[in-house]
């Protein structure tokens, strides 16, 4: 126990606070080395070195929580907004409007549509792209190849006449990444053509071995795109990026963003759904693609207690994202110490909630995912098996013992069975679970 005697030297109060905080941290670090420690030595060592990074994440969480709280207050969110609606969904009491208003303010957009009717992030992104593009237009992917599940949407991979952008006469090109894994600024300016109607920017790394883009980099790209082609619209795939920074792409000029509610903005409790946000005209066009022209944003039943989970999940999202970011720091620190290549590198500022680890062999990739599944709260007794999954070009293995099917904001990992056999780790409602998972992983790879 720390005792301050009245007869002690009168140290300044500020010094005493710092001294006490230092002793508390010291005792915490010492406790990590107790014989009953739940973490393996590699995790303990990593935790001892990540104090500054974890404190920076806590500050980020506070800033983003403040923004969310203000938006909820401005939308006058009340318990009457949590009820569901059936049938056409006409007779609901303003929950949709309040949620859309709050979400738009949080991401700095004119408008937003947040709906359970979006199947996934890919579905929401598709609605946004079809809002922009018409026959004869061109879509330009400016951050290299997009995520696997968009290949059939674009028509880059055969859609068998199912209605891809290519089927509707939309041309497609992509700008390869620079050697450092970032945007190729020179190639971007020369790639823009007069009929380039939409530039697609994927914020997260997807299944590519590249660094994810910061919002400032996205803002710089948007500025260049608008300079060389003022009529070109910018669509940002925002999956895995929400609340990782203090600003979002609409704040730096993105015309639309889209993503999934069972990733970051659902706060680990939203059971389904997605969103599109940005300029009002184009949000309404995306809503018409989701529903039908003339119906737009005014219809759509939301049965049960889903609206409450959307509001509550959105409020929890900054905290849950903060825990996931801490998990990425821990994974990178531990796996790099074992000699594996990691992306992002240890202790580098994060721009999404994905941590990639290059495992180098199919056997290690399978072993990693199996260890994650064994350490999950749901389905720990099952063994993940790689296989064909709708929308993916390669066989993929998923480890996702989550309470909500496919909820990568909880804790999951996956990877395509192709070189360099990288595993992509996401989410985590608290960093301590990754600490435990890593102990199981290190036994088997």
Image (cartoon, helix red, strand yellow):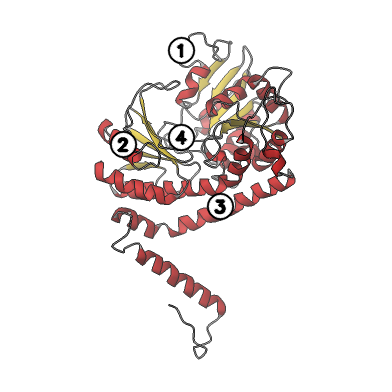
Question: Residue 121's spot in the image, x, y percent?
Answer: 54, 29
- The earlier-in-sequence mark between 4 and 3 is 3
Asked which secondary structure carries label 2, the reply is helix
Mark 4–mark 2 distance (CA, rounded to whole Å):
23 Å
Provide the residue designation for mark 1: 158
Mark 4–mark 3 distance (CA, rounded to whole Å):
21 Å
Question: Residue 229's spot in the image, x, y percent?
Answer: 65, 26
Mark 4–mark 1 distance (CA, rounded to whole Å):
23 Å
Outermost residue, top direction?
A: 161
- The earlier-in-sequence mark between 1 and 2 is 1
Question: Which mark is on residue 205?
Answer: 4
Provide the residue designation for mark 2: 370
Asked which secondary structure carries label 3, the reply is helix
For marks 1 and 2, give the one nearer the viewer: 2
Image quarter of residue 136: top right
Question: Residue 11's spot in the image, x, y percent?
Answer: 52, 83
- The earlier-in-sequence mark between 4 and 2 is 4
- The earlier-in-sequence mark between 1 and 3 is 3
- The earlier-in-sequence mark between 3 and 2 is 3
For marks 3 and 2, give the one nearer the viewer: 2
């Amino acid at each position: 126990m720390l005792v301050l005697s009245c007869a002690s030297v009168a140290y300044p109060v500020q010094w005493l606070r710092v001294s006490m905080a230092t002793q508390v941290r010291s005792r915490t670090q010492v406790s990590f080395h107790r014989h009953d420690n739940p973490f393996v030595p590699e995790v303990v060592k990593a935790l001892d070195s990540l104090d500054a990074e974890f404190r920076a994440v806590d500050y980020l969480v506070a800033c983003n929580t403040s923004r969310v709280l203000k938006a909820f207050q401005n939308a006058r969110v009340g318990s009457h907004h949590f009820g569901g609606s059936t049938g056409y969904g006409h007779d609901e009491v303003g929950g949709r409007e309040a949620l859309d208003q709050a979400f738009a303010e949080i991401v700095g957009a004119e408008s937003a549509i947040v709906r359970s009717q979006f199947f996934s992030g890919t579905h929401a992104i598709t609605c946004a792209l079809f809002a922009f593009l018409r026959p004869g237009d061109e879509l330009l992917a400016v951050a290299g190849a997009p995520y696997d599940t968009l290949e059939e949407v674009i028509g880059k991979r055969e859609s068998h006449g199912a209605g891809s952008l290519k089927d509707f006469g939309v041309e497609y090109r992509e700008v390869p990444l620079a050697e450092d894994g970032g945007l190729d600024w020179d190639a971007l300016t020369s790639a823009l053509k007069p009929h380039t109607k939409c530039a697609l920017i994927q914020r997260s790394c997807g299944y590519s071995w590249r660094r994810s883009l910061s919002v400032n980099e996205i803002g710089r790209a948007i500025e260049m795109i608008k300079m060389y082609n003022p009529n070109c619209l910018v669509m940002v795939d925002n999956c895995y990026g929400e609340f990782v920074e203090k600003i979002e792409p609409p704040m730096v000029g993105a015309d639309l963003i889209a993503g999934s509610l069972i990733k970051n903005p659902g706060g680990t409790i939203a059971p389904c759904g997605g969103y599109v946000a940005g300029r009002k005209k184009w949000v309404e066009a995306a809503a018409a693609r989701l529903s039908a022209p003339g119906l737009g944003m005014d219809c759509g039943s939301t049965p049960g207690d889903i609206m409450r989970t959307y509001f509550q999940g959105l409020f929890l999202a900054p905290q849950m994202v903060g825990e996931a970011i801490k998990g990425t720091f821990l994974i990178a620190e531990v796996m790099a110490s074992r000699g594996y290549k990691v992306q992002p590198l240890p202790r580098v500022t994060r721009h999404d909630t994905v941590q990639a680890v290059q495992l180098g062999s199919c056997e290690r990739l399978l072993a990693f995912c199996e260890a994650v599944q064994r350490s999950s709260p749901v389905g720990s007794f099952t063994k993940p098996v790689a296989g064909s999954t709708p929308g993916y070009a390669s066989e993929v293995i998923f480890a996702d013992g989550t309470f909500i099917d496919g909820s990568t904001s909880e804790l999951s990992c996956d990877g395509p069975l192709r070189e360099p056999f990288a595993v992509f780790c996401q989410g985590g409602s608290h960093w301590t679970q990754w600490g435990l998972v890593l102990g199981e992983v290190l036994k088997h790879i």
